[in-house]
Amino acid sequence: MQIKIVGRGWRKQFTVDLIKRLGVLAPITDSDDAEIFIVCEFAENSDELINLAKNGKCLIFLQPEEGSMKLFGQELMYTHHFPFMQLKYGEIPATFLQVFPPISLIKQKYGENLGFFAFNFSPSGENYTTRYPAIVWKEYGSGKIGLFLYDFIATMLLLLQGWEFFTFEGGLSCKSRTGIARAMHLFDHLIDRELASIPQAYFHELVLIALMRILVGQKDPLPRVWHYPYPETTVFLLSGDSDGLEKRLLIKAWSNLLKNDLPYTQYVMLEDLNGFSSSEIAEWKKSGIDFGLHYYAGANPTEKEMAGHMREAKKVFASKKMELISCRGHSCIWVGWDAHVKIMEKAGILYSSNLPYWYTGVSYGFPYFLYTQQARSKVQELQILCSDDTMLFNKTGMLPMTPAQYTKHLIALLDINNDLYYQPVNPIFHPYYMVKKPSTFDVLSDAVSFAKSKAIRIVNHAMFFNWWERRQKIKLFYRIEGKTIEFSSADSDVAIALPQSWKLKNLPDIKILKGNGEYIFCLKRKSYEKE
């Protein structure tokens, strides 16, 4: 099975990134011999593409397209910004997901549905769902066609990066009343608060892979490399920001972490890092304390000031015999949608880890590439799930939790991600609050105890990034002959995910994934037979 992405520019690259992030083993090709064609932009040759499906290919349009809409029914002369899609596909642990314009409405006559557009959900019992399909598919000739009636890529980009108009070219303000521009402003009024606790962007990806598998039917299960080593389904990531804490207290916090065998990433401000010698840093790194940059170029820096600060940070890290590859914004200070990403990229930073929402959920937990208006950058974002200071103290406009509530909240996040959502759990634990009274260390200890009881691995960011880069480089191929699926190699910890409908014989050990209709197993050998 091969996949061809039909399109160009950033939309094509974005689609390629998405398929690779999902770990789909079917190779991406430019050849028309591919079995699956994914159309990621309006196609001038839509009739030719539809004929490919008629002759046995599987075709997916990632946005409304006039020629394909006619195959499912009559396009209506009006449209509406329905803010939600109600999922009909039952393998995803969510009922509603947000969608964004452009949206097209049809009076459906043919095909099957994976979701319908919806106005809202109502506590008083009104039905705000519709019969307007959001995702449809049908057999066509000897092939099949799937169609998204919302712009799938635009929806994904917004959920991952926020509003496109957060740029100086858009003419809209990117600053709060305090005069500070924050990365969180990218997401102002974007994520519906009722859905802020679920990884919506990830669920949209699952809808796409589900549609692909529906179209290829029993020919191919589209195996994919799982997000973690077998049999993990989440990890507990530990990090925090130094925030000007004096050296002796930083050491106290790190010592307490290491005493409890807890690896940790310290996003450190330059003045805090300068208090340590390169040999001291080397010893801490050897013990399990990783370092990234907690950048701060002032409360309202210009692009020039931020770029200069990043250059200086690179020099300071080099003087401590460290490479600067990861960073986090101090209070998420941000100088512009495109500009900030380009500044990080020019500084050689590969990973950013910011807090997009005050709410406790996350749109997407795994690293994803940040895009500018020109192209994909080299910087990947790893969103923060929640933070001790925003959850425990009155600084967000939301009701603060008590330590006991926050402990239960963290345990719930670990539990639901381990069993259903499968995102990394990535909170912030500031060393400041670990050493002050009341200390958050008891909260962390209780959450760690729960993680260990569920065999959830505890890692710092560097450990996770190392795995993620290793996963991206896995070269693994497969082929299917009759009832046999054969892989090119076997690996001791790499997990393969298959739909539960595609059962293999004599698997020594599997893990059922209740949150996506898959199961995972290790490649103990190369060849397996279907039941």
Image (cartoon, grey):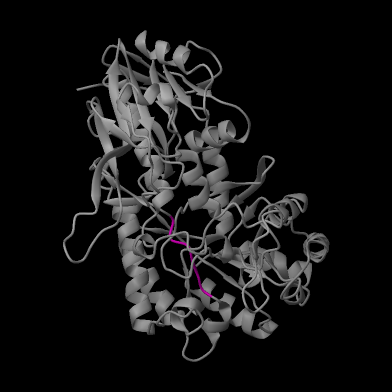
Q: Quadrant of residue 494?
A: top left
Side of 415 where 281 appears, left or right: right
Residue 511, position as x, y percentages in the image:
27, 43
Residue 140, position as x, y percentages in the image:
30, 15
Q: Nearer the viewer, residue 175 or 391?
A: 175
Side of 137 where 23 appears, left or right: right
Q: Which residues are magenta?
A: 424-429
Q: Nearer the viewer, residue 238 or 95?
A: 95
Residue 257, position as x, y percentages in the image:
52, 73
Magenta span dominant secondary structure: loop
Q: Nearer the viewer, residue 261 or 14?
A: 14
Q: Quadrant of residue 320?
A: bottom right
Q: Is residue 172 above or below residue 90?
A: below
Q: Is residue 106 above or below residue 48?
A: below
Residue 27, position as x, y percentages in the image:
49, 23
Q: Is residue 366 above or below residue 221?
A: below
Can I make out residue 275 in this image? yes
The N terminus appears in which quarter of the rendering? top left
Count of number-bearing discs: 0
- The residue depicted at 27 percent of the width and 45 percent of the height is 87
Outermost left residue: 125
Side of 103 where 471 appears, left or right: right
Outermost bottom residue: 437
- The residue depicted at 41 percent of the width and 26 percent of the height is 60
Q: Is residue 472 above or below residue 129?
A: above
The C terminus appears in which quarter of the rendering? top left
